[in-house]
Structures are given as structure tokens and as C-alpha cells.
Image: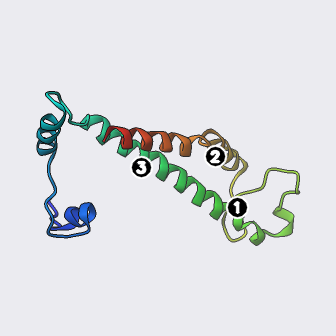
Amino acid sequence: VEISLPGVLSFLADNDPNSYVPGINDINKAQEEKYGPGDYRPNIPVAFWSFRWMIGFGMASFGLGILGLWLTRRKFLLPPAMRTGEDEVPNLVLFRNKALSPKFTKLYWLTALWTLLFPLIANSWGWIFTEMG
């Protein structure tokens, strides 16, 4: 399925939907004329995959954060008998008056702990994408 949006790339590049956007080969020829013979094209597979890894790690971090926010902010809906103390690991609440089992609560907290570096990894992939593309 091909979706065509005419003029969007031109608008993003030059703020004008009718401007010309040169391709990789055109830019390579211009660079060869300016700086001499050589291959000035970016590494396409690295740019392609680093963008996807950046978005993947970023979305995983965002999704886990939103899930954690939703699960922890509903704690006030638990009856007082189901609430944990201030110095205990909080119960995670899925629905009104329904806490997650201790197994899933522990699994979520471990997942959150092990994915603390995901934003940094996403940032690093974004840096690679910027430098390579």
C-alpha cells in the first residue's frame, strides 16, 4: 500500500510545498564536485535501523511509564484493608477494588527496574541516527 502526500517533504525541508528536494545521488554528485571524488552517501541501513531502535526503546519506555502511572495512581481506590504501608512495596491496582497479585506486582517492579536505561539507549540510537543520516 502506497500513501502519497504531495509536497510534505518539500514543506518540511524548505517550508515551501513546491520546493525541490534533492535525492541522495544528487547530493553525492554535488559533494564530489565540491570536495573531490569520494562516496558521500550516508550509510542507509544504519540510519534506517537506528531510527527504528530509537523509536522502539522510546515507545517501550513511554508505555511502561504510562502503565506504571495508571497502576500506581489508582491506589486510593483500594479499601484500607488492601493498602500497603508507607515503607512497603505498593500494590498495583488494575480495576476498582482489585489489586494485582503479588506475582504480577513484583514482575512489574522488576521490569521497571531492568528497563531504567531504555531512555538512555533510545537517546543513543537517536544520536547514531542523527550522525549517520
- Residue at the image point whose x is 86% and y is 68% from the top: 80
- Residue at the image point whose x is 24% and y is 37% from the top: 44
Q: Amino acid at mark 2?
A: Ala
Q: Quadrant of the C terminus?
A: top left
Q: Nearer the viewer, residue 65 or 92?
A: 65
Q: Nearer the viewer, residue 115 or 84?
A: 115
State the SS at label 2.
helix
Closer to the chain start, of discs 3 and 2, is 3
Q: Which residue is mark 1?
A: 72
Q: Is residue 10 above or below residue 115?
A: below
Label at residue 112: 2
How many marks overall? 3
Q: Is residue 83 left or right of residue 66?
A: right
Q: Is residue 72 above or below residue 87?
A: below
State the SS at label 1.
helix
Closer to the chain start, of discs 1 and 3, is 3
Q: Nearer the viewer, mark 3 or mark 2?
A: 3
Q: Nearer the viewer, residue 72 or 4?
A: 4
Q: Is residue 15 left or right of residue 57?
A: left
Expressed as whole percent of the image width and height from the top left, the position of residue 50 reads 37, 40
The span from disc 1 to disc 3 (Cα, nearest Å) is 25 Å
Q: Residues within 10 Å of mark 2 (few under 14, many from 20)?
A: some
The span from disc 3 to disc 2 (Cα, nearest Å) is 18 Å
Q: Quadrant of the N terminus?
A: bottom left
State the SS at label 3.
helix
Expressed as whole percent of the image width and height from the top left, the position of residue 35 reads 19, 33
Q: Residues within 10 Å of mark 1 (few under 14, many from 20)?
A: some
Expressed as whole percent of the image width and height from the top left, the position of residue 112 reads 63, 46
Q: Which residue is mark 3?
A: 55
The span from disc 2 to disc 1 (Cα, nearest Å) is 13 Å
